[in-house]
Image: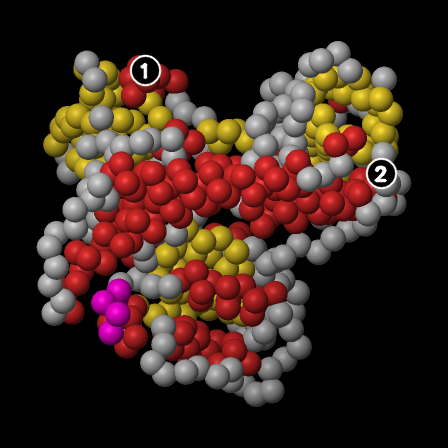
Amino acid sequence: MHEVDVAIVGTGTAGMAAYRKVRERTERIALIEGGAYGTTCARVGCMPSKLLIAAAETAAAVREAPRFGVHAEEPRIEGREVMARVRAERDRFVGLVTETVEGFDPAHRFHERARFEQPNVLALDDGMRIRAERVVIATGSRPVWPRAFEAVGDLLVVNDDVFEWTELPRSVAVFGGGVVGVELGQALARLGVRVRLFGKGGDVGPLSDPAVLRAALAALNRDLPFDPDADVQAIERDGDQVVVRFTEGGEAREEHFDRLLAATGRKPNLDTLAIENAGLELDDAGVPRFDPLTMRVGDSPIFIAGDVSNRIPLLHEAADDGRIAGENAAGWPEVLVHRRRTPLAIVFTDPNIAIAGKSHAELERMPCDFAVGEVDFGDQGRSRVMGIDRGLLRVYGERGTGLFLGAEMVAPRGEHLAHLLAWAAQARLDVPTMLAMPFYHPVVEEGLRTALRDLNAKLRLSPPAPPRSIDCGPGG
């Protein structure tokens, strides 16, 4: 029996952040990893997907060049070279993460799978047992798919598999209109792969504002056919082809593809932990119930962090989860409440899809009287200059106070606009104050000013503004 103050299960983004915080207070640590080192972001998420997207954006720029009077041949895309760069740079990012973990004190590291025997005892595969006064669960998540997809056998792939390709397939049926589906679907289409994207329930990424969702769908349909609520009757295998039968425009269709890419969600990695032995209350998804402001599970000395919490599967959120869980595990029995950052989500399609602060759906559910301002980037000056004149930005403000609440967008260079707006929401700025900020000319941010002017007019504030209410709250 090896005894420690804190055991951390998982060495991804959340686990590493937790380890650093715990080590500020104690050296009696067990950092346990049952799989390969390297975060989801570096190995199969943020970084390799952006490498593929960067290649796709380059191909798209060549195709768009004649619009500017710059003529070039149709881009010749060498799939083998594209994927070689993706894998090489991916391996570099993974290597940096691995070096970091391997740089942690070897006395703290246990490269074995762990499972709960008791709430404070973890059994490792090699027979060792670790008794920990506190435990941080940071085991991440993995892709899941409907059982019906298994009819195509080894032609079924998930995003993890894409980044192991040595060549691009000729055609791919992508299922899932969420972040992974729209990013990879558009990127593959721009790289010359025949792609059809099948969604379910009408989702386009994380968007909830109906007007922005329609604008995003229109933008994506420039590159590939995408039905966000597809009527699929059958998925079968015919030799080395995936056969999808579906209805489009009231007519029955059938298409054949080289691969079926399932981008249909992820599930927390809890099934090998014997979580039932930890004595925790679980939700309907089998995830321990926890407080997101402390990351503490119930009233136990167990904490949870990162994608395994089934909360917000984003790297910066996982890092914050780990930091909070680690600090509270190290400081136990004192547990501190931490303020969470304003929500910020970005999808790296072209144009970018983003939400900053409160979403439209959140505001609709709240006891909040809000107004909406917007700008269409089809008429925005700098966007037209650059030839990326498409998209819609909608901004939300509280009536009576002018407090800026949040925004949803599909916008050129929206990743930057989203940061500005998330900062404004976290700083609890009101719309008049935001309009008083400097705006250069000509820049895409002038489109934001147009939307804020529209919102300000609809708020119809009479100076001076009354005290701010708490009905809507800050962006986070």
Frontmost residue, 100 versus 175: 100
For the image, the number of numbered tags is 2
Note whether 430 is above or below 214 in the view shown: below
Residue 10 quadrant: top right
Residue type indicated by callout 1? Gly
Q: Is residue 313 visible?
A: no
Secondary structure beneath dot 1 equals helix
Is 334 left, or right, of 437 in this rendering?
Answer: right
Residue at (16% x, 46% y) in the render: 76
**Which residue appears at 30% of the width and 75% of the height?**
382
Q: Secondary structure at mark 2?
A: loop
Residue under label 2 = 27
Image quadrant in which the N terminus is located: top right
x, y (%) of residue 365?
A: 53, 52
Residue 296 included in the magenta stretch of the image: no
- Distance CA(mark 2)–CA(mark 1): 48 Å
The label number, if any, that marks residue 153 in the structure image: 1
Viewer-nearest residue: 101 or 301: 101
Task: Please determine whether, in this image, residue 321 is positioned above or below residue 413.
Answer: above
In-image side of 451 versus 115 (left or right) = left
Q: What segment carries the magenta color?
A: 385-389
